[in-house]
């Protein structure tokens, strides 16, 4: 509530009133928001936009002419520009009611040294600072996307009350934590946080894994017993759509599926779907991974993290189409084989 009080724009009062009328479907459906998406051309963004376009006016920031033109033909406002140079685009944008930040910083594939992590952290800092500056100009709430970064022990399950634990590649996003606590203290911008598990599906970073599997590179890192939260791309896109419907200002949500599978279960099933037979993946020992990919990537791959998705289900009425990796991977491979990615 503190955030709402400090925020002076009229439409936020409207949101508060909307909460009182939350059973009044008509009232909900007549409110059209201007939503600005940073990262709207990406793996998740491209699945989110069709879910919002019927009801809201969407503007997307992109550096990519082809993707921008495609979106423009579908009725999206497109602003061509770079998040690193937001000053150039400020004048081109009409008043927004919500900004969704889902930009992917330039993560380097393969080996990452301390120098690479430092460089990446500087880009992330710039992305975040420019987004905050833009949001302050717009005087509207923002949805920020983080990476899941919890470390759980045996029989432990993390939820949104757990402190974020930064290790491996997620160290590069440390500035996020400082910024979020500053914004909370300031109380000027209402923030909603999205904490996704590893996003898989036919596209994005997962394409590399799919292609490796099709090249019969049947491998698993370490002993494959660690668990990493997973979420199908369609389900995370639906999660954002639920956030837009409910506008739960000041809240954070973990988006992962229902079954915390091990990396061995996940990879073996993917290989089985692709090859049509049971496969025993080759294990790449951790010491070799550290030599090949460095400490940061190895720590990220070898993490053990089990999370709860209960809050998103209860508060957002979020429903999963792919509750476990089994349905999700089947749909992924089917789509990939049909060339849909
Ligand atoms: N994929 C995962 O497993 C995963 C896991 C946890 C969290 N996340 C987070 O989830 C969000 C969505 O991920 P995703 O997989 O959908 O990402 P993605 O497919 O790689 O999309 C990246 C998006 O970021 C935009 N972008 C990057 N740098 C930009 C810049 N300088 N200026 C303007 N736009 C820029 C790109 O726009 P243009 O190229 O069109 O300019 C593109 O739309 C990201 O914040 C990511 O960090 C992803």
Image (spheres, rainbow, N blue to C red):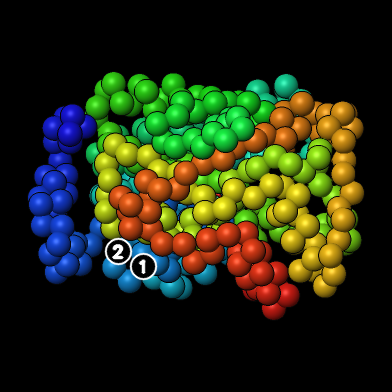
Residue 69 position in % (x across, y down): 51, 67
Q: Quadrant of the C terminus?
A: bottom right
The residue wearing badge 2 is 56
- How packed mark 1 is, by other alpha carbons closer than 10 Å (few <14, some 14-19, many 20 or more), is some
Query: To which quarter of the image does residue 6 belong?
Result: top left
Residue 123 position in % (x across, y down): 58, 31
Residue 47: in sight, yes or no? no
Residue 198 position in % (x across, y down): 60, 47
Determine whether the residue tagged by mark 1 lies in a helix, strand or loop. Answer: loop
Position of 54 with respect to 195 (left or right) is left
Residue 31 position in % (x across, y down): 19, 62
Q: Quadrant of the N terminus?
A: top left
Which of the pair 201/80 is nearer the observer? Answer: 201
The residue wearing badge 1 is 53
Position of 219 with respect to 328 (left or right) is right
Which residue: 87% across, 35% down? Answer: 285
Position of 59 with respect to 82 (left or right) is left
């Amino acid at each position: 509530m503190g955030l709402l009080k400090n925020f002076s724009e009229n439409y936020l009062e409207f949101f508060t009133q909307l909460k009182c009328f939350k059973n009044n479907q008509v009232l909900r459906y007549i409110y059209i928001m201007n939503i600005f998406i940073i990262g709207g051309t990406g793996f998740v963004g491209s699945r989110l936009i069709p879910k919002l376009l019927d009801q809201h006016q969407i503007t997307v920031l992109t550096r990519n002419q082809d993707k921008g033109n495609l979106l423009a033909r579908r009725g999206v406002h497109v602003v061509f520009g770079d998040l690193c140079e937001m000053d150039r685009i400020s004048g081109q944008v009409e008043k927004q009611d919500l900004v969704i930040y889902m930009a992917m910083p330039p993560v380097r594939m393969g080996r990452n040294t301390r120098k690479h992590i430092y460089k990446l952290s500087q880009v992330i800092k710039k992305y975040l600072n420019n987004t905050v500056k833009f949001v302050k100009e717009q005087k509207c709430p923002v949805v920020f996307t983080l990476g899941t970064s919890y470390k759980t022990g045996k029989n432990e399950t993390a939820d949104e009350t757990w402190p974020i634990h930064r290790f491996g590649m997620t160290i590069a996003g440390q500035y996020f934590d400082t910024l979020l606590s500053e914004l909370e203290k300031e109380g000027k911008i209402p923030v909603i946080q999205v904490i996704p598990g590893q996003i898989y599906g036919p596209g994005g970073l997962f394409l590399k894994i799919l292609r490796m599997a099709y090249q019969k590179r049947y491998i698993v890192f370490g002993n494959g017993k660690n668990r990493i939260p997973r979420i199908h791309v369609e389900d995370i896109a639906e999660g954002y759509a639920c956030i837009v419907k409910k506008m739960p200002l000041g809240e954070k949500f973990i988006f992962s599926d229902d079954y915390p599978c091990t990396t061995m279960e996940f990879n073996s099933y993917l290989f089985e779907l692709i090859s049509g037979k049971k496969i025993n993946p080759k294990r790449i020992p951790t010491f070799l991974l550290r030599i090949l990919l460095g400490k940061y990537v190895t720590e990220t791959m070898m993490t053990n993290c089990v999370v709860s998705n209960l809050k998103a289900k209860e508060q957002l009425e979020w429903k999963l189409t792919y509750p476990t990796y089994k349905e999700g991977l089947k749909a992924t491979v089917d789509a990939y084989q049909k060339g849909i990615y």
